[in-house]
Amino acid sequence: MYLAQTKKRRIVFCILASFLAIIIGGGNYTTALITTIMMALILIYIIKNKITYKSLYITIMLFLLISFVISIIAPGNSVRAAQEMPGRPAILAIILSMYHAFVSLGIWTKLPQIILFISVTPLLFFISKNVQFSFKYPFAAIVFSFLCFSAQLTPPLFAMSTIGSGRQINIYYYSYYLLMLFNIFYICGWLNHKKIIDISSAKKLITKNIVPISVTLLLLFVAGCFQYGINTLTSADTALSILNGSVYEYDKEYYASVEQITSGNTSIKDIDTVPDFLNKLWIERDSEFWINRKLAEYFNVDKIELKE
């Protein structure tokens, strides 16, 4: 929308962005919160620079906030809150989110990630050379991106004293890559702006040694993958599971359990063969366990129990 050349295109992009704002604002709290922060920053920039079509950005922000508020005040939240563990006070949740964010960055930044970031740095460096932006505040940009990253962890800490389950942590993990790339890009832009590195000399050096540099980075990346486990790569883990047949065994056991439930046998075994990227049913002996209850509701049976 910002780069659109005509009023008609801006309006079309505004409608599309507003639709996305409704989906994001009414969805996951973590995603809604960081999107609101980003939109607020965009609005400040738009207003400060007196962009003539700022009403379009305000429209998107309103759709986002209205959806977010509806999601927050929805009656189902109180029902779920009664079943969860007690939360943390707001200020403490903010402080803890920064602590957990710092710990997560340390856990996730390993050799494969470092090699990935080094590999993309030359590209981002050359791209930033042609960007019409001053890149004046690298330290502030790094701090801001860290606080945005931390803000994602605040809702679950506030609501239930934890940073959330695996699906929630996945959101932090993906944003980690985006924010790291943002920081690298900003620092590259700052180096270009300050002319600390001679871009022509750097380009010649990289071009001249592109083969040994690429081979070295690739070998280090592969070494890191094997050091921390090749199955930490979802694509590699999926391929290995297909090759060793575990994914097919999982499929067989899963549908066998479903067939037993639908035929009236509600005492079932959990799945034994589980590839790393999939999960067991996680049912318990206690039929009142929440997963047992939800499965029973889904299949419209009285109860489901774990067969030893």
Image: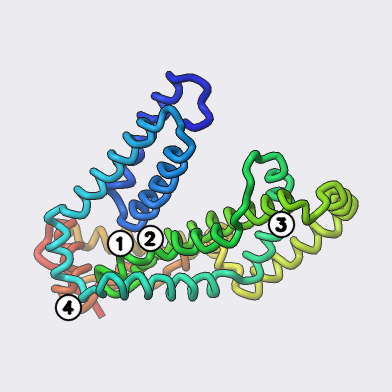
Q: Name the residue carrying label 2.
A: 252
Instruction: Name the residue type under label 4.
Output: Asp
Vertical placement of 158 versus 56: above or below? Answer: below
- Residue 139 coordinates in the image, percent (x, y): 58, 62
Q: Distance between the residues labelled 1 and 2?
A: 6 Å
In primary-sequence order, the first of circles 2 and 4 is 2
Q: What element carries label 2?
A: helix
In primary-sequence order, the first of circles 2 and 3 is 3
Instruction: Name the residue type under label 1.
Output: Ala
Q: Name the residue carrying label 1.
A: 256
In primary-sequence order, the first of circles 3 and 1 is 3
Looking at the rendered image, the quarter that the C terminus falls into is bottom left
Vertical placement of 108 versus 41: above or below? Answer: below
Instruction: Name the residue type under label 3.
Output: Ser
- Residue 243 coordinates in the image, percent (x, y): 57, 61
4 vs 3, front mark: 3
In primary-sequence order, the first of circles 4 and 3 is 3
2 vs 3, front mark: 3
4 vs 1, front mark: 4
Q: Name the residue carrying label 4.
A: 286
Q: Name the residue carrying label 3.
A: 119
* Tag of residue 21: none
Question: Can residue 19 be seen at all in this image of the molecule?
Answer: no
- The residue drawn where x is 86% and y is 59% is 212
Q: How far apart are marks 4 and 3 (CA)?
A: 51 Å
3 vs 1, front mark: 3
Q: What element carries label 3?
A: helix
Q: Position of 13 compared to 262: left or right?
A: right
Mark 3 closeness class: few <14, some 14–19, many ≥20 residues within 10 Å: some
